[in-house]
Amino acid sequence: MSLSLNEIEATAKRAARGAGYTWGHAEEAGKATRWLCAQGLDGVWALASLLHQNLAHAPEKHAPCISGDTWTGTDVLCPLATGCALSDSAEVLRAAPVTLTNVNAPALLLPFASNAARILNSGVSITIDGAEAQTDGLTLHLTGAIPDQAQSVTVRLAEVAPPTQRQQSRATPDPAAWSVLTRFAHRTYAPATEESRLRGAGAGLSDND
Amino acid sequence: MNETGRHIARRDPAQVMRLSRLGSLHQCRLSFMRQLTRRMAREEWTFTRPVFAIDANGVGHAVYTAQGPDHAYSLVAFAHDLPPEKRSDRVIAEAWDATFTLFDGVPTAQDIERLGQNVPLQEAGRVSEHELSLSRANRSVRLWAHVVDRLADGQQPDLDQIYDVGYLMRTTAVYGSGKFGAADREKTADRPELSAPFQTEMLSVYLIRTFVRDLVQHMARAKGGENTADLDPKIARRLGIGNSTGLGMAPFIVNHPILFNNWIMVREEAIARVRSLPRASDAEIAQFQNIFDRSTLSISWWRSEHPVQIRKLADMTSDIQAIASHLDGDALTQDAPWDRLITWAEEALSEEGQELLASLVLEPYGDLVDGLASCMADSNTNAQIIDGAMPVSKARELILNNFEWALALDWAAEPNCARAWYVSEEKLEPRLGERFEEPIAEYEQPLAPARDAAAAYKALADWHGDIPIREFLLQHPEHRHTIRRAQIGRIAPYGEIRDNTISADVMPIDMLRAKLSFFGATHFDPRSDRWVRICMYAGAPYPEDLTNDTADTWVYPEPAA
């Protein structure tokens, strides 16, 4: 199915919330998924595989402990919590590269690296095990396949090679992954009751006038 | 600055962003409908109706094409025979009297075939990147039957009934920006004619109005045959398109603080520029007086059965009398006349009257204010990125800027958090529920920025002011959305509502009206505290009459000769 990027973002945000993320992280998940889709990557698939891991149930275990240039968690790192920290800490990249160990769904780090590039007004490269990505904030140069889980990710300032990805205005995500997101998103919808139908929207008067 | 050196600042957000004032806003010359009609006239757009295939039962489809300098846009309209028991303005409706899409370009027969299988289903169908909007409308049963019967009988409709209702159909949703598969706004945002906010939606409704006029004539003729009268163009001109709106618009203005700020700030800047003028010429005074008189005529046709709006209309009636007597004096011939007028209004009038005047004083000054319209869109995607290096002390200060008033509220007290915004699984209808009476709290949407700001401020209390906010956010991701909003406040001083959006006595219609006033809506008619009907384009020229002379002040009716 051909989806608008607005639909991708809205559903991804709701899905992340439905999976237990905070609203702030859910907003980031929506924008990150949209950014990946705009680069022609299946961000929906990446987010669906993350949400399956159920990391939001013990968020503190999957958030990075930041000490020096190497960031690790007490368990596998969540790319949303880690990506937010990366974007928020963009300026530390000016001093030295940052290395992350053991990251789930690491494709979701790319949009946050792009935030860092925008904040620093500089190219940023991100090495995910054997894959190499470079972004200036808007475009993406990618070589190699991004793994489902990365042992080691290194983020540094870099010259950016010409984009390998064409910007997309639509997305056709993996159907199974899309239905995973819609299923998680559904958890944010209140079950309909007769009372809420009458009171909640506040109509109730006849429209046949 | 002006020649006397006096410069009146924009009004304080603390004054402007109260819900009762936002719920008293009126259209002005910066409104999105008027921006569109002025542009279409200036650029000499042409309009055609290549298809009108509707049978005697009112079932079929039609195409209306608007051709601008670089792009054409076509309304594809589907007319249906709707049983009365299915007629509902709610999102949860599943059938309508008419359904529409705005096609980017001119549709082929294949496009129309595809759209015919999807557009009538609305949310249950899919449109594509070729479509820019998706919408539907229901008849005003009463006025529709009256107009069809009269015309079929060889007579014109009764003017009082036209004024009482104001429209033959009301739209119940106009979806744009990528909804249900339509093109994202990014596809068209760089086109001059669609770069201002909601121009796609306003163009859709403009063409819908023309279709509805043609359809009622067609239905009258099907009934009355050769004796049928042609609807008097002067009466047709008075007919607008209604809109029936529920809670969906309230989350919109909370979820788009930069966009909402840009609308309010542009209007405030326009008001400040006019207030800063050292004097008004005779021609400007005459123009203002003329527009004021005509606006009172429009207001005299404003009907509502809702007690709150009845009271507000009574206030406005006395406001109008007070303004009229005030203008009889030398109010506008002194120096700084517009500033004096606005200052006088703050003491003498209700908020309805104050905001009416604030909109009306812009009318003689198109050259001074219309250029501001280009600042009403939001293209600042970088503003969503949090600045993690900001010190905690600065984040606290930003929260105080918007929400100092909210910090002292007891947010656990039932009256202060009695409501919760949620989305129903039924067609994802946005709703507002009673937190302590319904099982909805776990589904709550983040639409209480004031409460969340107070919570974040409290959590920040233990943090040293010099620490970068990123360290706080790493430990407290639950406050991330609030810190983002606080930082957005640096570029959006009018982005936050300065009232409690979940209190026991919140009136969501205030939020709906704020948004609808910027569309250019008139005759707000609340059906409840969370539902409102309005009128759009009443008085506007139809395509064949659209010229530079008719394109702007149509919202103010000329008195009958």
Image (cartoon, coloured by chain):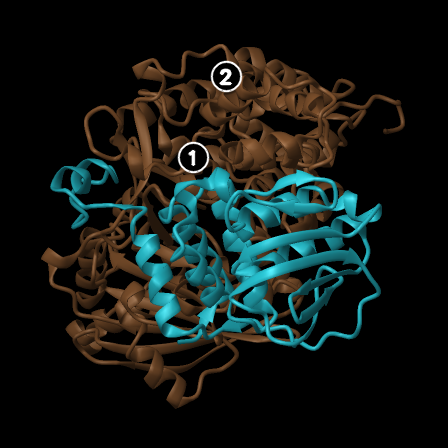
Lateral position of residue A61 relative to residue B268, left or right: left
Q: Cα distance, mark 2 to mark 1? A: 15 Å
Q: Colour of chain A?
A: cyan
Residue B175 in sight from this viewpoint: yes
Q: Please name whichever residue, B284 or A142, is drawn nearer the observer in this view of the structure.
A: A142
Q: Colour of chain B?
A: brown
At which x and y percent is residue B274?
72, 31
At which x and y percent is residue B321?
47, 19
Kind of residue at badge 1: Leu
Question: Which residue position is annotated with label 2?
Answer: B406
Nearest to N terminus: mark 2 or mark 1: 2
Kind of residue at badge 2: Ala
At which x and y percent is residue B14?
59, 20
At which x and y percent is residue A175?
37, 73
- Say whether mark 1 and mark 2 are on the same chain: yes
Q: Residue at x 55, y 36 (%)?
A: B480
Label 2: state its secondary structure: helix
Q: Quadrant of the N terminus of chain B?
A: top right
Question: Which residue position is annotated with label 1?
Answer: B447
Q: Would you identify the image quadrant in which residue B263 lies? A: top right
Q: Please name whichever residue, B297 or A18, is drawn nearer the observer in this view of the structure.
A: A18
Task: Indicate the chain on which mark 1 is placed.
Answer: B
Q: Please name whichever residue, B233 or A43, is drawn nearer the observer in this view of the structure.
A: A43
Residue B559 in sight from this viewpoint: no
Lateral position of residue B308 relative to residue A96, left or right: left
Asked if B213 appears above or below A172 in the picture, the reply is above
Asked if B390 appears above or below A16 in the picture, the reply is above
Lateral position of residue B227 relative to residue B531, left or right: left
Label 1: state its secondary structure: loop
Q: Would you identify the image quadrant in which residue B315 lies? A: top left
Q: Residue furthest bottom?
A: B109
Q: Residue at x 27, y 52 (%)?
A: B91
